[in-house]
Image: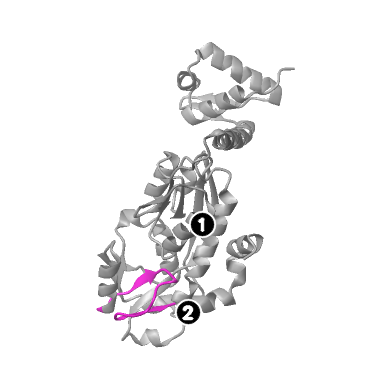
Amino acid sequence: MPELELRHLRAVCAISEEGSLTKAAIRLGLTQPAMSAQLRTVERIVGGQLFDRTPGGSVPTDLGKQVVGTARLVLDEVEQLVSLAKERTRDGTPGPLIVGGVPTLFFGHFVEELRRHIPCSEVRTEIMPGGSDLLELLVNGQVHLGVLDRFEGMERRELRGLEIRRLISEPQFVALPDWDPLGEQEEVELGRLADRDWVSPPDELVGNRLQIFTVCAEAGFTPRLTHHVNEASTARSLVANGAVSFALPQSRSGDGIIIRPLRGAPLMVDLMLATRREGPAAGRAHDVFACAARAYRAVLPRNPGYAKWWAENPHLHPEIDAALILAGD
């Protein structure tokens, strides 16, 4: 009986991604009969049909979905193995590490941790306004690793060649003017903000727009997104003069605003760490994750309210705690 080869795995992945045996053959530089022969070989080995031919193209069967998913994992591992081997056969001089991120308050610490722990000639950075744009840079190889927020539709995007782990599910706090009576409370009930004007990034940069409207609806209102701003000092100025906004939990009070946690942490945003399986960080995803964990912990003292929340909710940040224990921190 013939055995599966990497060319067979590439063939079934190409058919799945192109949705057409003909297009997959063109992509791999094969004739259509040769592509059909490879598909038949795989189907004989696994014992079932992998694709249904429909008017819309070749659609994976349930068995096909399992085979394609496993094939992608195998091909990614092979790519990583080759990348590591190439790294070891070079002249030993590391190249630059290009790091992407969405706006966060621990990114500077993250860069410094990477300088200390990941061999590279220098660390360069690319800050993008939203996770969708950053993911495109990662997939295209324009950055080697990045910190991004999980956005709606992320699971439908092309993620091949990336290792992605959740860093933390981060609670969103609220920013209020410092004269607001609600600021006197340790925690703010989201429903108490129903009549306020909200400051928000432009719609196309809000990766969790549906989540925001859902939690506000559960609190009994639709947020009045009056001010669309993508610049921190302007947003803080609007809040100081009467508006409100969601805020990163490490944000500091001051300059006319006060940062408070929302009662029950109704809005949680997943921060993800993506590392390419090739390039300077290939094979070092665990080290990169430890760097991100140390950097995140370093900014907790910025907001005593978040430091308190962190201590009271250890079950909500297990990934960071585990990474620091493994790193010996």
Looking at the image, residue 139 lies above or below residue 67: below
Judged from the image, the secondary structure of the residue bearing numbered disc 1 is helix
Residue under the image location 53 percent in, 39 percent down: 92
Q: Which residue is mark 1?
A: 116
Majority secondary structure of magenta residues: loop
Q: Residues within 10 Å of mark 1 (few under 14, many from 20)?
A: few
Reply yes or no: does residue 255 show up in magenta.
yes
> Does the rendering let one see residue 47?
no
CA neighbours of label 2 inside 10 A, class few (<14), some (14 to 19), many (20+): many
> At numbered mark 2, what does the secondary structure look like: helix, strand or loop?
helix
Q: Which residue is mark 2?
A: 305
Q: Is residue 25 visible?
A: yes
Q: Which is more N-terminal, label 1 or label 2?
A: 1
Residue 29: percent from left, percent from top: 48, 17
Q: Quadrant of the C terminus?
A: bottom right
What amino acid is found at the position of numbered circle 2 in the picture?
Gly
Q: Nearer the viewer, residue 10 or 262?
A: 10
Using the numbered discs, state the Cα–Cα distance from disc 2 to disc 1 in whole angstroms.
30 Å
* Residue located at (38% from left, 69% from top): 246
Q: In the depicted view, which residue is nearer to us: 281 or 317?
A: 281
In the image: residue 4, left or right of residue 152:
right
Picture quarter with the N terminus: top right
The answer to whether mark 2 and mark 1 are in CB contact below 8 A is no
* Residue bounds of the magenta highlight: 241-261
Question: In this rendering, is residue 33 above or below 90?
Answer: above
Q: Amino acid at mark 1?
A: Arg
* Residue 273 pos. (x, y %): 50, 53
**Taking 248 as reference, is 327 left or right?**
right
Q: Is residue 108 magenta?
A: no
Residue 80: x percent and y percent? 57, 37
Q: Residue at x 54, y 55 (%)?
A: 117
